[in-house]
């Protein structure tokens, strides 16, 4: 119950009152709480940014001036911004270009070991619905739409997109990104190389996702370890899962080119080349690129304009929710 009460300190009172659906459930992410204890850092929570900031944020003060606010993007950053801004008394309209709220959490939770992440945006979605936020799905925001609505403030939370990766010999068929793989948008062959370009969980969970389908998977990392930026508590669990599924972990190694079904690699310290044979598909999990075109197009055209989450800079879910909560308090 320790981490459960970090995620939602009001859990006992909500349970006693029968408000079970309003409990913000711990998703066992670990990276902002127990791992920080091990590192001697301040404890927080990936989905409750008030934790560790109670002196400044425990009291959510009503807005002195009530504003008409548009939030663009229904991922965790946008949902949290809409929630907090509405609680403070602003009138909020949220636009999401797809047919479902949740953003990248919907993608990450496709992996079996990360399914619990989906409860983060389930909770946020329920809260904004209960608060009466005006939600528009399947709506791509344009400068013309914003001009017509004439809001006092616009919060852009449009997230990020996978980068274009230029590798000699790569085609749209033999090189795909991890988001497309998890969403089932691309075909992946039986023998796969995954490029762990972030050192976080995306590459590892994609490798796990493919291995669960019976595929033979190699995962490459430039540094000392695959998933070297995963927190110290979670990393052993990730390794155990990968090794149980017979994923081959290849540190100190990166891709040079693709030649037919041969992936040419090189050692990142000696630069000596080698090859992995009979590979059908290369999947890249690389640092994302901010999707900020609508933010740029609105500069100088609205009274207040904010970029949050991956739209500001691609980072982790904890930072996205923190950004949303922060801007909700500043509006």
Image: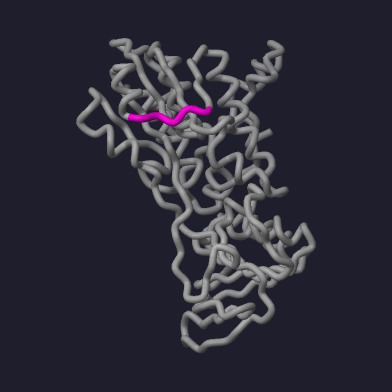
Q: In this rendering, would 61 be left or right of 220?
A: left
Identify the residue at horizontal 38%, vertical 13% (top origin): 90
Question: Which part of the image, by quadrant, shows the C terminus?
Answer: top left
Q: How is the image coloured?
A: one colour
Residue range of the region highlighted in magenta in the rendering:
138-142
Q: Position of residue 262 (x, y in %)?
A: 62, 80
- Residue 2 located within the stretch drawn in magenta: no
Report which quarter residue 218 is drawn in. Answer: bottom right
Prevailing secondary structure of the magenta residues: loop
Q: Quadrant of the N terminus?
A: top right
- Residue at x 49% of width, y 16% of height: 133
Picture quadrant where residue 120 is located: top right
**Residue drawn 69% across the image and 42% down it:** 115
**Whole-percent x and y of residue 322?**
43, 35
Q: Residue at x 63, y 19 (%)?
A: 22
Q: Quadrant of residue 253?
A: bottom right
> Is residue 51 toward the left or the right of residue 276 in the image?
left
Q: Measured along the vertical axis of the image, is residue 329 above or below residue 279?
A: above
How many marks do you count on the picture? 0
* Residue at the far left in the pictured view: 300
x and y percent of residue 314 in the render?
Answer: 42, 48
Q: Is residue 220 above or below residue 5?
A: below
Of the pair 289 and 62, the residue shown nearer to us: 289
Expressed as whole percent of the image width and height from the top left, the position of residue 140 reads: 44, 31
């Amino acid at each position: 119950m320790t981490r459960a009460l970090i995620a939602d300190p009001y859990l006992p009172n909500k349970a006693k009152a029968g408000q079970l659906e309003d409990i913000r459930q711990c998703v066992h992410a670990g990276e902002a709480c127990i791992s920080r204890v091990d590192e001697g850092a301040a404890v927080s929570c990936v989905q409750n940014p008030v934790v560790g900031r109670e002196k400044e944020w425990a009291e959510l003060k009503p807005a002195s001036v009530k504003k008409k606010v548009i939030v663009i993007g229904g991922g965790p950053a946008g949902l949290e911004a809409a929630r907090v801004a509405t609680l403070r008394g602003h009138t909020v309209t949220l636009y999401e270009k797809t047919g479902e709220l949740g953003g990248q959490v919907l993608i990450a939770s496709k992996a079996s070991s990360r399914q619990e992440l989906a409860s983060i945006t389930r909770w946020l979605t329920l809260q904004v619905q209960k608060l009466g936020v005006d939600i528009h799905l399947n709506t791509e925001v344009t400068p013309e739409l914003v001009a017509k609505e004439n809001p006092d403030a616009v919060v852009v939370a449009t997230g990020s997109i996978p980068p274009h990766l230029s590798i000699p010999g790569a085609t749209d068929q033999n090189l795909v990104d991890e988001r497309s793989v998890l969403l089932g948008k691309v075909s992946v062959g039986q023998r796969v190389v995954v490029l762990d370009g972030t050192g976080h969980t995306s590459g590892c969970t994609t490798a796990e996702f493919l291995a669960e389908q019976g595929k033979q998977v190699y995962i490459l990392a430039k540094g000392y370890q695959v998933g070297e930026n995963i927190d110290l508590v979670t990393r052993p669990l990730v390794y155990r899962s990968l090794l149980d599924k017979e994923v081959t972990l290849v540190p100190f190694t990166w891709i040079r080119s693709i030649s037919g079904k041969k992936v040419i690699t090189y050692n990142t310290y000696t630069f000596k080349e080698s090859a992995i044979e009979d590979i059908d598909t290369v999947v890249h999990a690389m640092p994302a690129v901010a999707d900020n075109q609508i933010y740029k197009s609105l500069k100088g055209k609205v009274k207040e304009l904010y970029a949050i989450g991956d739209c500001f800079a691609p980072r982790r879910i904890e930072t996205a929710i923190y950004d949303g909560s922060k801007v909700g308090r500043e509006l």
